[in-house]
Image (cartoon, grey):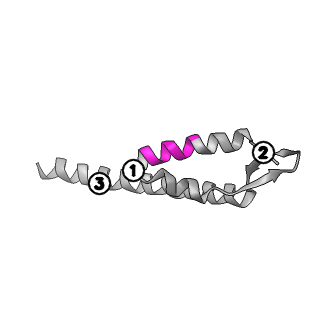
Amino acid sequence: MSYKISDLVAMRFIQIFQEAVLLGVDGADLMRQVRLVVDSNDETTVTLDPQYELQVADMHRKYLEDAERLKSQASVTESKLIFES
């Protein structure tokens, strides 16, 4: 049996490439984490496992929280430098 990938899978692969570049992580590690299931609407297509999609959404939320925290820290540090000058 051969399968094709859904658009969601293709988009996730592109996201993984972008995450690897932006975060400086090994994209192969992210690729190994991908979980697929047979699409319930088309048995010749595989799509992202719903649990995996939730895991990715949670990971992205954490990335954004970390980015906001780093942004706030940089802002505080910048303010200290201005006042100390």
Q: CA distance from mark 1 to mark 2?
A: 31 Å
- Between disc 1 and disc 2, whose residue precedes? 2
Q: Main secondary structure of the magenta part?
A: helix
Q: CA distance from mark 3 to mark 1?
A: 25 Å
82 or 73: nearer the eye?
73
Question: Pointer 1: residues within 10 angstroms few (<14), some, or many (20+)?
Answer: few
Regarding mark 1 in the picture, which secondary structure is present there? loop
Q: Amino acid at mark 2?
A: Tyr
Q: From where the camera sits, is residue 59 visible? A: yes
Q: Amino acid at mark 1?
A: Gly
Q: From where the camera sits, is residue 60 visible? A: no
The residue at the point 42 percent across, 53 percent down is 25
Residue 16, percent from left and from top:
54, 47
- Between disc 2 and disc 3, whose residue precedes? 2
Check residue 76 in the rendering and tell me which mark sits there, or answer none: 3
65 or 19: nearer the eye?
19
- Between disc 3 and disc 1, whose residue precedes? 1
Q: Is residue 58 magenta?
A: no
Check residue 74 in the rendering and tell me which mark sits there, or answer none: none
Which quarter of the figure has residue 52? Answer: bottom right
Regarding mark 3 in the picture, which secondary structure is present there? helix
Question: Pointer 3: residues within 10 angstroms few (<14), some, or many (20+)?
Answer: few
Residue 70, percent from left and from top:
37, 54
The residue at the point 71 percent across, 61 percent down is 51
Q: Going by the picture, which residue comes out furthest to the front?
A: 1
Which quarter of the figure has residue 80? Answer: bottom left
Bounds of the magenta segment:
14-21
Dots 1 and 2: beta carbons under 8 Å?
Answer: no
Residue labelled with disc 1: 24
Check residue 3 in the rendering and tell me which mark sits there, or answer none: 2
The residue at the point 51 percent across, 43 percent down is 17
